[in-house]
Structures are given as C-alpha cells and as structure tokens.
Image (cartoon, helix red, strand yellow):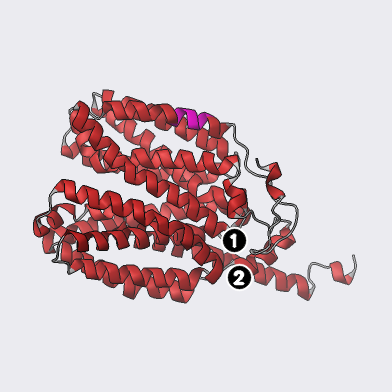
Amino acid sequence: MSLSQSPSTPDTAAYASSAAITNRILWENVVLAALLMLATLPGRTQGLGLITEPLLADLKIDRIAYANINLWATLIGAAACLPMGWVLDRFGLRWSSGVLVLALALVVWQMSGHTGGVMMLFLWVLLSRAVGQSALSVASITAAGKGTGKNMGLAMGVFSVLMIVFFCVAFPAVGSVVVNQGWRSAWQYIALGLALGIAPLVLLFLREPKASAHKAAATSGESLTGYTLPEALRSRAFWVFGGTTSIFNLAISGLGLFNEAVLAEVGFTAEDYHQFLVVMTIFTLVGQGLCAWLTLRRPMPVLLGCAMFIYAVALGALPHIQTHTHLWILGGMLGITTGFITVIFFAVWGQAYGRAHLGRIQGAAQMLTVLASAVGPELFERTRHSLGTYAPVLHVIAVPVVLLGIVAWRTKLPSPPSATVTPDSVDEGTLSKAV
C-alpha cells in the first residue's frame, strides 16, 4: 500500500474529524428542529384549543364565529408554506428560523393583550397560523431533514419522538396555567419562552449542514443532487405521499377537535377519552421508533401502505366499539399508524427528491396537509349537524384511505439524478425516471 493510500495519512484523519463534526451538527439540528416544532404550539389547532373556552368567554364570541375565524385563518395561512421553502433555500436555516420564532413571539404577545373585536382577533389567529403552523413547521422539518442523507429515516424517527415528548410536557403545563392564571398569562409565558428560550438556541446553535454534509456524502458515494419543485410536482410520488398524509391530516384534525364527542356517541365518558389519549400517545411513540427502524430495512411506500390500511380499519371500526378493550385496541391502532405516517412524512421528501431544493418541496407538501387539516373539523361537524352522528364521515373517509394505501404500496420513489448539481442548477430532464 502506498503512503497516499494509508488510512493513517493526514488527509484521512482530517476527513474523519470533519465527518465527526458534520455528524454532530446534523444531530444537533434534529434536536433543534424538534424545538422549532414545539414553538409552533400557539399556532396549531391543539394549542389554540387549550385557550378556546376561556377566550370565547372573555371576548364574548360565539362558537360559529370562532370556527369560521379558524377555518379561514388556516386556509389563508397555508399560503405561507410555499414562500417559506424558498426563503429557507435562499437565506439558510439559522436566520430564517430565528426570525420566525421571534415573529411568532411578538404575535402571541400581542394576541394575549387583545380586547378588540372579531376582525383583530382574526388577524392574530391568521398570523399565528401563517407563522406558526405553516412557515415554522416548514423550517422545522427542513432543519431535521437537510444533510441526514441515508440516515433520513432514523433521524426523522428521533425527531418525531422528541417532538412528541416536548408536546407531552408542554400541553399539560400550558393547560395548568390556563386553568389557574387564565389564557392571557399562558400566552404571555409562551411568548417569553419563544423570545428568550427557543430563539436564542436557534440563533446560536442551528447550522446549515449543506457544505459539510456534501463533502461527507461525496466520499461515501451518496448523491448530492436534487429535484426542483416543478420536477417534484410532476412526479407521481409527490402526489401519492402528499395525498395520503393530507387525508390522514383531514381525519386526524376532525377527530382531534371532536374526539371526546365521537367517543361519547358510542357510550364512553370524558375520563375514558383522557385515558384513550394516553394510550394513543404511548403507541404513537412506539410507532415512531418502529418506523424509524423499519425505514432502514423496508421501502417507505410499503410502510406507508401498511399504515394506511390499519388506519382505515381503525376509522371504520371507531363507531362500532363497545368495550374498554375495544377502546384500548383502537387507541393502539391509531397511535401506531400516527407514528408511522408522521415519520414517513418528515423523511420521504429528502430521500425521494434530494437536498438541493428540500425546503421548497417540503413547503409545498406542508401546504397540502395544512389545507386538509383546515377542512377536517368543518367536515366532521357538518356531518354531525346534518345526520346526527359522526359515523358516516368516518366510514366515507376510510374508503379513500384504503385506496391511497394501495396506490402508495405500488409507488416507487424517484431515482436520483445522475449529474452533480448545486441548489440553483438542476437538470430539468432528470425526472423521466420518476414519472
């Protein structure tokens, strides 16, 4: 072996050191990405749900008006997903994400002092949705996905588990403040936590992994290329994965808002509902860990197809459960599938379309899911209002869930482009293998 080929040469040692630093940065980014997702809490349906009742009583707003505010704020706010992808690709993760967190802190602080009419409340909810649920969610999944390469599935599994753990701590903490000190105090504490806690961490430690990750990938033979957003939109895989996760979000948002009422319809109490949430959360964590492990061994389309089939069975069975055993089994099924679909949604875009334009592609996918989540609660409540029960909407949604699961099972992810490119230079003809 020549000196240049020796594993102990300075170049090899330097590369090993660089690879170790790169790996550390990527995993730090995964943790920070989970914190960024936690920061979206005041802009999400579940977060706003924590203050709905005291807010309505305080501002003397009826439920129909507030439901319309949330519907239109979510639909309009979804438009922030697409430009956010471009902003991340153009200006980088650290400053874009830090500015977003500070902007959301300002919005939440201003909302905590709101005493005006419906239009101003609509403005604050709209900004919460646009900055929090839409733009900051895109920043979070992009921070977790960029540079993870062949470890994408594992990284997204860790990210998803951390995210669930953070939310499990945050929800009861915020809920306790709402009960004991009021919704305004809770929103003020969240604003301070965003501005003085998460924003400084992001600005100090979040790093753009592109340059260092590309060097490591080049040595390992990993593709450094990526599809553009128009190319991704012309592929079957984008619409299959975007469609499956969107219909999942449609159903889960409707259930999330009216789950207690759905279970009450079949004879379960509020206490049963709270225990059901605990079971579902535990199995969501199990599903995320299992899916992260399986993504290293099985194709993501197959995993998504299996998850969608189980999800369809759970939706169809929900109106017919009768015993607590049925309820715990149902919670396990919904939790496992939620864990699988969450990990796959976060992981598939980087694996399928590369890192060059990941922010824009994930922004488009996130917009689909946000639009679907806006429609879900409205669809559930209109069905109950018209037919007196939630059962028909659950049965109807189960059908396309099964069909999309079958399509997902048979879908192949795009082949990587053959040419090495930069984020601003992608061969427009590389999609032929993927369509």
Look at mark 1 in the image and give the residue it sits on: 147
Residue at 48% from the left image edge and 28% from the top image edge: 403
- Label 2 crowd bin: few (<14), some (14–19), many (20+), radius 10 Å: few
Q: Amino acid at mark 1?
A: Gly
Q: Is residue 263 visible?
A: no
163 and 67: which one is in front?
67
Residue 166 coordinates in the image, percent (x, y): 35, 58
Look at mark 2 in the image and give the residue it sits on: 21
Q: Please tell me the numbered disc located at residue 71.
A: none
Q: From the viewer's perspective, is 115 left or right of 434?
A: left
Up-down: is 63 above or below 9?
above
377 and 167: which one is in front?
377
Residue at 41% from the left image edge and 62% from the top image edge: 136
Within the image, what quadrant is residue 270 found in? top left
- Residue 404 in the magenta stretch? The answer is yes
Up-down: is 13 above or below 47?
below
What residue span does the magenta drawing correspond to?
A: 401-406
SS class, disc 2:
helix
Within the image, what quadrant is residue 214 found in? bottom right
Q: Is residue 274 visible?
A: yes
Q: Amino acid at mark 2?
A: Ile
218 and 7: which one is in front?
218
Residue mark closest to the camera, 1 vs 2: 1
- Label 1 crowd bin: few (<14), some (14–19), many (20+), radius 10 Å: many
SS class, disc 1:
loop
Residue 226 coordinates in the image, percent (x, y): 65, 55
